[in-house]
């Protein structure tokens, strides 16, 4: 019987041919070698599978799985976890890179921690980068790095407070910057397919509020920014990927049993109502954006459809003011049904 590898490096792929060779080169160059590479292709229409299989011929640690149907972004991430065998899971996206000592450095920290490790990251801006977008990413890096400061660690309680203080950002980073003990996904769940943009941030909230996070201030990963990336595609859907995802994240923090410890931490810090205020802000923003869209000539019905999909999956709001907005949402959507 073949023993399980120490680390499963998960590479979810969809039309990643332009960058996959560079990604896999970075993986096989790791100084720590006890790993498997799971390339899980989500029905690519380019040469991704052929490239992956070529690498698998040369390196038996590389396994290629092709999904029978397209699972979508989050579904494919979760398929990677399902197929993994290692004690640790390290994601590396098809267009990202990691330094040769990345696995070794993260494992050294991870073994002495609760099992959730993150590192800082650099950026590689492809093509003709938008100066505003470039400034956004660099400012985000500085903000995330500053959260950990000299401690390089956040306890579960400290994570909850830090998330509240920096509510509108991912306080850990993209999946390529994390290393997670596989059993934590079994214990706290996998990525939520209801989310389209901040699915990683919500997952980190679950892990961070329960086991804390260790942070390595060195940039061990390079995150590639380019026009064809999923992150950039989602920027073209600001209502769904930004506003509605924000409602889902805030709703889960306020309502879901998964976040009981999160709410307890904030109550101990004397900030028990702060989550409700964040949800209130996001619900109001969504309502007024939707109302404005419905009042255009011709009306923009896409926002209504996106909101309806989300409302059908949430269980309502408990706070009276938010319940009132819930019914206003429903009434607005119902009135719009008569619009041709």
Image (cartoon, rainbow, N blue to C red):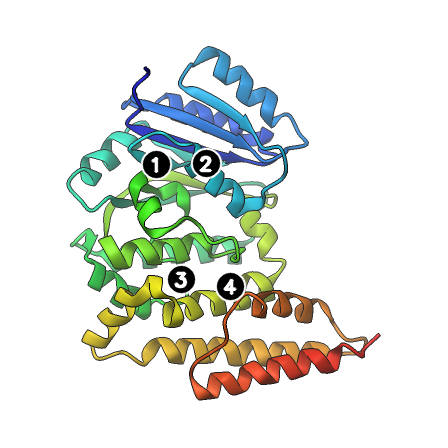
> Position of 86 compared to 211: left or right?
right
The Cα atoms of the two marked residues, 1 and 2, are separated by 9 Å
Q: Residues within 10 Å of mark 2 (few under 14, many from 20)?
A: many
Which residue is drawn at the image coordinates 31% and 24% (left, top)?
5
Q: CA distance from mark 2 to mark 4?
A: 23 Å
Q: Which mark is residue 89?
A: 1
- First in sequence, mark 3 or 2: give its number: 2
Give the alpha-carbon distance from disc 3 to disc 4, as whole Å.
12 Å
Left or right placement of residue 156 versus residue 224 in this view? left
Distance from Cα at disc 4 to Cα at disc 1: 25 Å
Q: Residues within 10 Å of mark 4 (few under 14, many from 20)?
A: many
In front: mark 2 or mark 4?
2
State if disc 1 and disc 4 touch (CB < 8 Å): no
Q: Earlier in the sequence, mark 3 or mark 4?
A: 3
Give the mark toward the camera: 1 or 3: 1
Say whether residue 219 is left or right of residue 289.
left
Cβ atoms under marks 3 and 2 closer than 8 Å? no
* Residue 338 vs residue 47, the one in the foreground: 338
Which tag, 1 or 3, sits closer to the chain's start? 1
Residue annotated with mark 4: 245
Secondary structure of the residue carrying tag 3 is loop
Vertical relation: 272 (above or below) 73: below
Disc 3 residue crowd, few under 14, some 14–19, many 20+, Cα 10 Å: some
In depth, the one of 111 and 238 nearer the eye is 111
Q: Which residue is mark 3?
A: 169
The quadrant holding residue 268 is: bottom left
Going from N to C along the chain, the mark reached first, 4 or 1, is: 1
The single residue placed furthest to the top in the displayed view is 58
In the picture of the structure, the residue carrying the numbered disc 2 is: 80
């Amino acid at each position: 019987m073949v023993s399980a590898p120490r680390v499963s490096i998960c590479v979810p792929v969809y039309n990643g041919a332009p960058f996959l060779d560079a990604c896999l080169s970075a993986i096989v160059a790791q100084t720590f070698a006890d790993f498997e590479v799971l390339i899980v292709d989500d029905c690519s229409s380019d040469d991704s599978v052929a490239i992956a299989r070529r690498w698998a011929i040369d390196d038996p640690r590389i396994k290629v799985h092709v999904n029978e149907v397209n699972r979508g972004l989050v579904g494919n991430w979760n398929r990677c976890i399902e197929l993994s065998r290692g004690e640790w899971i390290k994601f590396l996206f098809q267009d990202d890179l990691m330094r040769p000592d990345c696995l070794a450095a993260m494992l050294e920290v991870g073994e002495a921690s609760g099992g959730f490790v993150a590192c800082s990251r650099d950026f590689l801006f492809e093509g003709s980068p938008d100066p505003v977008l470039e400034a956004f990413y660099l400012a985000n890096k500085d903000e995330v790095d500053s959260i950990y400061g000299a401690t390089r660690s956040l306890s579960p309680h400290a994570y909850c407070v830090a998330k509240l203080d920096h509510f509108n950002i991912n306080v850990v980073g993209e999946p390529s910057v994390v290393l997670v003990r596989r059993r934590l996904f079994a214990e706290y769940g996998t990525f939520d397919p209801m989310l389209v943009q901040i699915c990683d941030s919500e997952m980190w909230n679950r892990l961070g509020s329960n086991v804390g996070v260790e942070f390595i201030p060195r940039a061990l990963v390079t995150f590639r920014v380019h026009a064809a990336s999923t992150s950039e595609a989602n920027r073209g859907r600001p209502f769904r990927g930004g506003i509605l995802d924000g409602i889902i994240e805030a709703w889960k923090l306020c309502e879901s049993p998964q976040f009981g410890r999160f709410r307890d931490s904030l109550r101990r810090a004397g900030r028990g109502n702060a989550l409700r205020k964040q949800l209130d802000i996001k619900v109001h923003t969504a309502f007024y954006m939707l109302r404005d869209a419905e009042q255009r000539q011709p009306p923009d019905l896409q926002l209504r459809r996106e909101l309806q999909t989300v409302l059908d999956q949430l269980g309502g709001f408990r706070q009276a003011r938010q319940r009132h907005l819930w019914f206003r949402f429903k009434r607005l959507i119902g009135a719009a049904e008569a619009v041709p």
